[in-house]
Image (cartoon, rainbow, N blue to C red):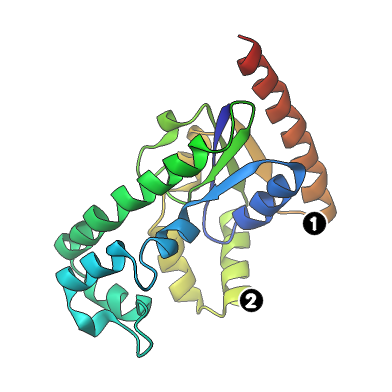
C-alpha cells in the first residue's frame, strides 16, 4: 500500500486533483467529508458535541449548524481545542478503517487540508501539494466563492504559507493553468504513484 497525503491551500483546487485521482483508481479518503460524517444526526460524535456545547448549535432538523458552532469555537482557542478533542479521534479512527479495507496493493490518497499546519507530513509515504500563486487563490475565492477580498485574505492568512506547504512536498501539481493542463499533470502524477506503489510492494 502506498499512503499519499494530498494537500493545498484554500482555492488551489485540491478537490479537482482528488477527483481525478479517484477516477484513475486511487482510494481517496477525504478528511473533510469524514469530519461531517462523524457528527451526522444520530452519531455518537454529534451527541458528544451537543453535550459539550449545548443544543443551541443544532439546526431545526437536528443536524449540526456549522455556522453557529463556528461562532462559538473560532473566537475561543480553548473551546476549539475541546471540539477538536471530540472530532479528531473519530475522524482518525474512520480514516484508518477505510484505509485498512483498501487492500495491500492500493494507492490510498488522504485528502487533508492541514497537513503542513498540523505537522502531519511524516504520517504518509509522500506528500503531494496542489499549488497556485497567492493571487490566483485570492481571485478564485472572490470569483467562485463570493468572498470579499478581505475575507479571502484572512482565510489564506489563517493557513500555512505557500513556502511551508512546498517544503513538505515530494511532488507538486501546479494548478494555475487550464483543466487540460491539470489532466496532463494528474496523469503524470498517477503514473509516478503507481511506479512507487509497485516498488513498495516488491521491496
The numbered disc on residue 179 is 1
From the viewer's perspective, is residue 196 above or below residue 64?
Answer: above
Q: x%, y% of residue 79?
A: 17, 64
- For the C terminus, give its image quadrant: top right
Residue 74 visible within the image: no
Q: Secondary structure at mark 1?
A: helix
- For the N terminus, give its image quadrant: top right
Work out whether mark 2 precedes mark 1 in sequence or the reverse, and give the earlier one: 2
Q: Estimate the spatial distance between the alpha carbons at disc 2 and disc 1, rounded to whole Å.
A: 17 Å
Q: Nearer the viewer, residue 170 or 54?
A: 54
Q: Secondary structure at mark 2?
A: helix
Local packing at callout 2 (Cα closer than 10 Å; few below 14, some 14-19, many 20+) is: few
The numbered disc on residue 143 is 2
Q: Depth-wise, is mark 2 or mark 1 nearer the camera?
A: 1
Q: x%, y% of residue 33?
A: 49, 60
Q: Residue farthest to the bottom? A: 60
Amino acid at each position: 500500500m502506498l499512503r499519499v497525503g494530498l494537500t493545498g491551500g484554500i482555492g488551489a483546487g485540491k478537490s479537482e486533483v482528488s477527483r481525478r485521482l479517484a477516477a484513475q483508481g486511487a482510494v481517496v479518503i477525504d478528511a473533510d467529508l469524514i469530519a461531517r460524517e462523524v457528527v451526522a444526526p444520530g452519531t455518537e460524535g454529534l451527541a458528544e458535541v451537543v453535550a459539550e456545547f449545548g443544543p443551541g448549535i443544532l439546526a431545526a432538523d437536528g443536524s449540526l449548524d456549522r455556522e453557529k458552532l463556528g461562532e462559538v469555537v473560532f473566537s475561543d482557542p480553548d473551546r476549539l481545542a475541546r471540539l477538536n478533542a471530540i472530532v479528531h479521534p473519530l475522524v482518525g479512527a474512520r480514516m484508518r478503517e477505510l484505509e485498512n479495507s483498501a487492500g495491500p496493493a492500493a494507492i490510498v490518497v488522504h485528502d487533508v487540508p492541514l497537513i503542513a499546519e498540523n505537522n502531519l507530513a511524516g504520517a504518509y509515504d509522500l506528500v503531494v501539494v496542489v499549488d497556485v500563486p497567492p493571487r490566483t487563490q485570492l481571485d478564485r475565492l472572490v470569483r467562485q466563492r463570493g468572498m470579499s477580498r478581505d475575507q479571502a485574505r484572512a482565510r489564506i492568512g489563517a493557513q500555512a504559507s505557500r513556502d511551508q506547504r512546498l517544503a513538505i512536498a515530494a511532488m507538486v501539481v501546479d494548478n494555475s493553468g487550464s483543466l487540460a493542463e491539470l489532466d496532463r499533470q494528474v496523469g503524470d502524477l498517477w503514473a509516478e504513484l503507481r511506479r512507487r506503489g509497485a516498488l513498495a510492494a516488491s521491496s
